Amino acid sequence: MSVTVRIPTTLRPLSGGNSTVQVDGGTLREVLDALDATHPGFRDRLFDEEGNQRRFVNLFVADDDVRYLQGMDTPVPDGETVSIITAVAGG
């Protein structure tokens, strides 16, 4: 199943500068595993040492925050978009 992953500007160096990446996967976990396999470094930026989603990272399947769905087990239909949104701080 081909899925589009939207990459935020702050993480684009990991994806070779690409704003989107196509990977395969049927669940969010599979999609993100495939993303890290093809573009190493994403796992460390998205998850802490225990494997939990970092607080400043939001993950969406379509327009739905996975924290309110099934988390990493959220199904990702073929052709769907996964968005990685990182919090931006500053003053």
Image: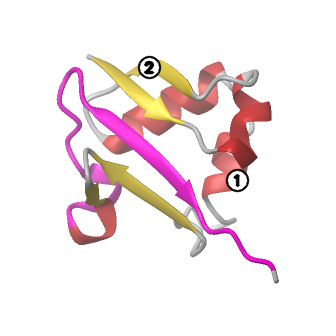
Q: Is residue 60 located in the magenta-colored stretch of the structure?
A: no
Magenta-tinted stretch: 69-90
As measured in the structure, the alpha-carbon distance from the residue carrying label 2 to the one carrying label 1 is 18 Å
Q: Position of residue 90 (x, y in %)?
A: 80, 78
Task: Tell me the residue at 35%/53% (across/down).
Answer: 60
Q: Secondary structure at mark 2?
A: strand
What residue is shown with label 1? 45
In the displayed orientation, state which residue is furthest to the bottom. Answer: 91
User: What amino acid is found at the position of numbered circle 2 in the picture?
Assistant: Val
Q: Earlier in the sequence, mark 2 or mark 1?
A: 2
- Is the residue marked by circle 1 packed among few (<14), some (14-19), or many (20+) residues within 10 Å? few
Q: Is residue 88 located in the magenta-colored stretch of the structure?
A: yes
Q: Position of residue 1 (x, y in %)?
A: 26, 16
Q: Give the total of numbered labels.
A: 2
In-image side of 82 versus 26 (left or right) = right
23 over 88 or under it: above or below: above
51 over 80 or under it: above or below: below
Task: Tell me the residue at 17%/30% (across/down).
Answer: 77
What residue is shown with label 2? 23
Query: Which quadrant would the C terminus be assigned to in this image?
Result: bottom right
Q: Which of the colour schemes (rainbow, by chain, secondary structure, one colour) is used?
A: secondary structure
Task: Tell me the residue at 66%/66% (across/down).
Answer: 48
Does the image show residue 40?
no
In-image side of 54 versus 1 (left or right) = right
